[in-house]
Amino acid sequence: MTNFPTALRAREYAWMDQDPSIYFNAASVGPLPAAAVAATQEWARLRERPQHIPLALMQGAAATARAQFGALIGADADEIALMPNTTYGLNLAARALPLRPGTILTFDGEFPSCVYPFQALGSRGITLDLIPRVNGLPDEDTLVQAIEQRDDVVAVVVSWVQFATGFVADLERIGNACRAKGVFFIVDGIQGCGVRPIDVHALPIDMFASGAQKWQLSPWGTGFVYVRKELITAIEPHDVGWACMKSSTDYTRLTDYEYDFFDDARRFEVVTLAYQDFAVANAATGVMLEAGVANIAAHIEALGDQVVQWVQSRKDVRLVTPADPARRAGVFAFTPDNLPAMHDRLRAAHVVHTVREGAIRFSPHLYNTSEEMKRALAVLDS
């Protein structure tokens, strides 16, 4: 793609040049690109008269979503199960993996989706231990040491990118420690998927879940879970419905009741899929694949460099996000001495951001420009 990101912005986000706001909140909700808005309108017209929607079109939308989501993370389509969100995928990991009684490890400060589904396993003799933070960031050294030295660890669940700090976990290091001890490795990928390149086939990850409504610029209610191919048929689905059976592809014999799961990750797709929403997600994902995740990552890194340099020039602001580009992704968090005042200045200037865990959080994406970041930081300097 030439002239990245200017040409993409002009085509997919032309409204941003007319609107007074600067949108730095992809870590909460990603704005739909124009291609996805067009797909929304097209499928709304189709859904108005569903008798004219071929079954093949609906099934094709789901198949395309599995293939494109897989392409974002280096997985095969048959390793992808479509999910409504990250939490559902993490619950699948918690409930379906053959976990013996023992301990699951995670970082203190994780998003609650990495905590509650695993805390709920107490009746199976499984407890969740939180590795304390150091200087507000995950303590990866202590986590790896615990994996290597403890015999009660049965699984590890971490965010690839932390929602509040932007800290990027070393998935290879943690995964290798897990694999050496026969420990399942589960990853919440929502704050990194589409922001940074990843090849799950090159990493010792067992399950990777992501919602698509943030950085993947897709509708609410769309997402996926990757299940390592060798695990797919070894896992007995915890939730069972008609849609995860092979017979669900033939609507003329649904009451034959053949209890025979799909041999691929579709065995974890329990209910009728939101075909309309996934078709819209396909349009959004297509924009991202066209742009190239590596290009997106480089662009966001450059925007982050501006934030880091600005914070480091101020004595009244502390950088929460790691300064090292290898340890940060799209989330850039900082804590000013007078947070309410800076928060109010940004809101008054229509800089769309959020406050998380006592810090201002910027999360720019492929559509933002260096000039916008300069303007936002100038607001804070004013």
Image (cartoon, helix red, strand yellow):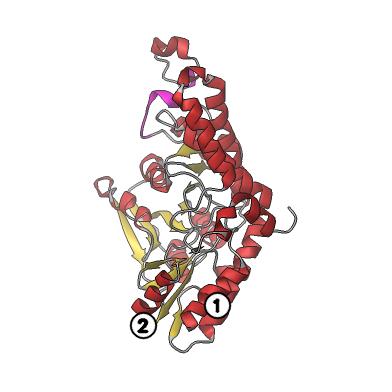
Amino acid type for the residue under numbered disc 2: Asn
Residue 121 location (% of width, % of height): 29, 48
Query: Spatial distance from mark 2 to mark 1, Cα to Cα?
Result: 18 Å
**Residue 341 vertical position relative to residue 301 in the rendered view, above or below:** below
At horizontal 53% and vertical 84% (from top left) the residue drawn is 312
Residue 274 occupies quadrant: top left
Residue 154 within the magenta-colored segment of the rendering: no
Mark 2 or mark 1, which is nearer to you? Answer: 2
Residue 209 location (% of width, % of height): 47, 47
Residue 111 location (% of width, % of height): 38, 59
At horizontal 73% and vertical 59% (from top left) the residue drawn is 3
Amino acid type for the residue under numbered disc 1: Val
State left or right for residue 286 relative to residue 27. Answer: right
**Residue 324 vertical position relative to residue 188 in the rendered view, above or below:** below
**Residue 136 vertical position relative to residue 215 in the rendered view, above or below:** below
Residue named by callout 1: 308
Residue named by callout 2: 338
* Label tally: 2
Asked whether residue 123 is in view, the answer is: yes
State left or right for residue 106 relative to residue 201. Answer: left
At horizontal 51% and vertical 31% (from top left) the residue drawn is 43
Residue 176 occupies quadrant: bottom right
The magenta stretch is 238-247
Q: Nearer the viewer, residue 295 or 382?
A: 382
